[in-house]
């Protein structure tokens, strides 16, 4: 990392940006907590279904590198 | 590149963070999911233009962000409906206190200019590099840095410091968000 000479030596002194490291990390923490709360919900079914349905864009004849086996009932045509 | 199984899996794996990003941007869970859905459709329709080996999440985030932008311009936040809508998306209800603090934070985040908010989220929560965030937002790396910096200062002013808004946040980007131990 860079040389943190004048700044960040004291954790209670605001740096040039006006923020103490403590406040900065608090913001970071809350931001991630909020974000991760949603991330932890995983993939809602609606999106999994969506992607599955669109598996074969052209209509189904596109089996990429023969690794197929996961399209259950793609038989639209 | 065609839609292979592994690419499809990778897209699916990006959905949770796309949702988180969309919710942070729009402050509205329902709208966020619509955004994500549109993003996925758009991505799949344009999958040929995705370069294999490039950053898939960044590509998807770019699409989502652009969709949000055009949508935003169209209707400019029809309702200031933020209240409670975000809380609805939470499966685990935090304790009363934590929830209050959480809510306060979210409201403060909403007050940031959009440019700053998205930059802060991309770097501070989604974990993108400044370079990736710059490419997602279509601006210079230095611009992202200063937006993130201003966003933090503003948040701090709103949340932790009473009425001290003149921080002169122009330079000094100490990316503590990335390197905070806890």
Image (cartoon, rainbow, N blue to C red):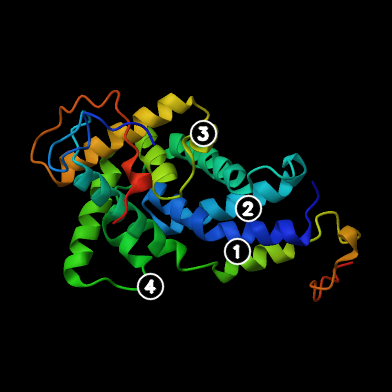
Q: Is residue B167 above or below residue B156?
A: above
Using the image, name the chain to which the residue with label 4 belongs. Answer: B
The residue to which callout 3 is attached is: B131
Determine crowd level at label 1: few under 14, some 14-19, many 20+ residues with C-alpha closer than 10 A: some
Determine crowd level at label 2: few under 14, some 14-19, many 20+ residues with C-alpha closer than 10 A: many
Residue A47 numbered mark, or none:
1
Marks 3/1: CA–CA distance: 29 Å
Which x, y percent locates residue A54? 74, 60
Marks 3/4: CA–CA distance: 33 Å
Q: Nearer the viewer, residue A17 or B156?
A: A17
Q: Are marks 1 and 2 on the same chain?
A: no
Determine crowd level at label 3: few under 14, some 14-19, many 20+ residues with C-alpha closer than 10 A: some
Q: Nearer the viewer, residue A19 or B89?
A: A19
Q: Is residue B131 above or below residue B56?
A: above
SS class, disc 1: helix
The residue to which callout 2 is attached is: B40
Which x, y percent locates residue A2? 36, 32
Residue B91 numbered mark, or none:
4
Marks 3/2: CA–CA distance: 23 Å
Determine crowd level at label 4: few under 14, some 14-19, many 20+ residues with C-alpha closer than 10 A: few
Lower sequence index among marks 2 and 4: 2
**Circles 1, 2 touching at the beta carbon (< 8 Å):** yes
**Circles 3, 4 touching at the beta carbon (< 8 Å):** no
Image side of residue B78 versus residue B69, left or right: left
């Amino acid at each position: 990392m860079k040389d943190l000479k004048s700044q960040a030596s004291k954790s209670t002194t605001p740096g040039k940006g006006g923020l103490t490291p403590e406040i900065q990390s608090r913001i970071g923490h809350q931001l991630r907590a909020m974000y991760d709360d949603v991330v932890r919900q995983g993939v809602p079914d609606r999106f999994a279904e969506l992607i599955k349905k669109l598996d074969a864009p052209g209509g189904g004849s596109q089996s990429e590198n023969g690794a197929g086996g996961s399209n259950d009932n793609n038989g639209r045509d | 590149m065609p839609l292979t199984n592994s690419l499809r899996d990778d897209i699916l794996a990006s959905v949770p963070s796309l949702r988180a990003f969309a919710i942070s941007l729009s402050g509205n869970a329902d709208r966020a999911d619509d955004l994500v859905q549109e993003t996925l459709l758009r991505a799949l329709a344009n999958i040929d233009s995705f370069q294999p080996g490039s950053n898939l999440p960044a590509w998807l985030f770019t699409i989502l962000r652009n969709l949000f932008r055009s949508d935003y311009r169209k209707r400019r936040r029809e309702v200031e409906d933020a209240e409670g809508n975000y809380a609805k998306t939470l499966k685990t209800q935090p304790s009363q206190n934590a929830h209050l603090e959480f809510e306060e934070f979210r409201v403060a985040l909403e007050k940031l200019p959009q440019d700053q908010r998205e930059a802060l989220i991309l770097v501070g929560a989604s974990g993108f590099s400044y370079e990736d965030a710059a490419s997602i937002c279509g601006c210079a790396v230095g611009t992202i840095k200063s937006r993130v910096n201003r966003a933090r200062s503003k948040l701090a002013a709103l949340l932790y410091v009473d009425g001290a808004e003149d921080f002169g946040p122009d330079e000094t980007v100490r990316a503590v968000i990335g390197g905070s131990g806890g």
